[in-house]
Image: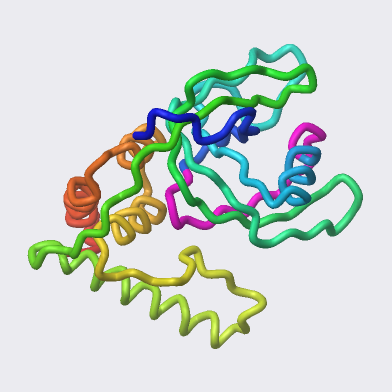
Amino acid sequence: MTTQPLLHSLPLFPLGTVLFPGGLLPLRIFEVRYLDMVGKCRKADAPFGVVSLTSGSEVRKAGADAESFAAIGTLAVIREFESPQSGLLQIECVGTQRFRVRSTELQKHGLWVAEVEAVIEDVALEIPDDLKHTASALRRLVDTLEERRRAQGAKTVRLPIGEPYRFDDCGWVANRWCELVPMQLELRQRLMELDSPLMRLELVSDLLARTGIAE
């Protein structure tokens, strides 16, 4: 982890999900606080931070307590933007750098902003032989999804995994399985926070074996 702030006044989007580096995140936005945030981020070509909710809900309700969220999140960069009608945005983001929240401020219109520091990126690490079945199973899944997309039309089927594919990299394969395998939100968050991509993949391999997805 760096000792210098990565970003000051980073806008945060607390969600009931975990965004991993390299992951895709489609969002349908209608709350004023986030419409404004996304508009400003797009105009400035700047990211916002996705953090996993620990209490509260994604949509603010009158009289409800403020959200609380995990201390480690991931920067989200907007890569697709559509406004089908007034007061509604549909965007797709990609996760980039993990960060640790150092301080937060809740602004008067309900948007959280934070000062954050970067968390060290996963080291590129070749998948060991005893875990290569996890990559092979992921490749088969992607091939199946791509065949389905070609059959139904590229515009109607979206892949949950974006290119470039890195089937030889521990962290990338582990992250994609963490997004796809059903698990509790707290476990998904803990896996994202792990410093070791190899340990993350080992734990994911155990989950896959238990579910019979990859053995």
Give the residues in magenta: 19-34
Which residue is nearer to you in this view: 198 or 183?
198
Where, quadrant-wise, is the N terminus in this rendering?
top left
Q: Reply yes or no: does residue 23 show up in magenta.
A: yes
Please say whether residue 210 is visible from this viewpoint: no
Where, quadrant-wise, is the C terminus in this rendering?
bottom left
Please say whether residue 115 is visible from this viewpoint: yes
Residue at screen point 43% across, 37% down: 118
Which residue is nearer to you in this view: 61 or 101?
101
- Relative to residue 77, is residue 34 depicted above or below? above
Residue at screen point 50% across, 29% down: 116
Residue 89 in the figure: left or right of residue 48: right
Q: In the orientation shown, which residue stands out farthest toward the right? A: 86
Q: In the orientation shown, which residue stands out farthest toward the front? A: 4
Q: Quadrant of residue 142?
A: bottom left
Residue at screen point 44% across, 26% down: 71
Q: Reply yes or no: does residue 214 show up in magenta.
A: no
- Relative to residue 156, is residue 2 depicted above or below? above
Residue 111 in the figure: left or right of residue 84: left
> Residue 14: x, y in percent?
58, 32
Which residue is nearer to you in this view: 50 or 98?
98
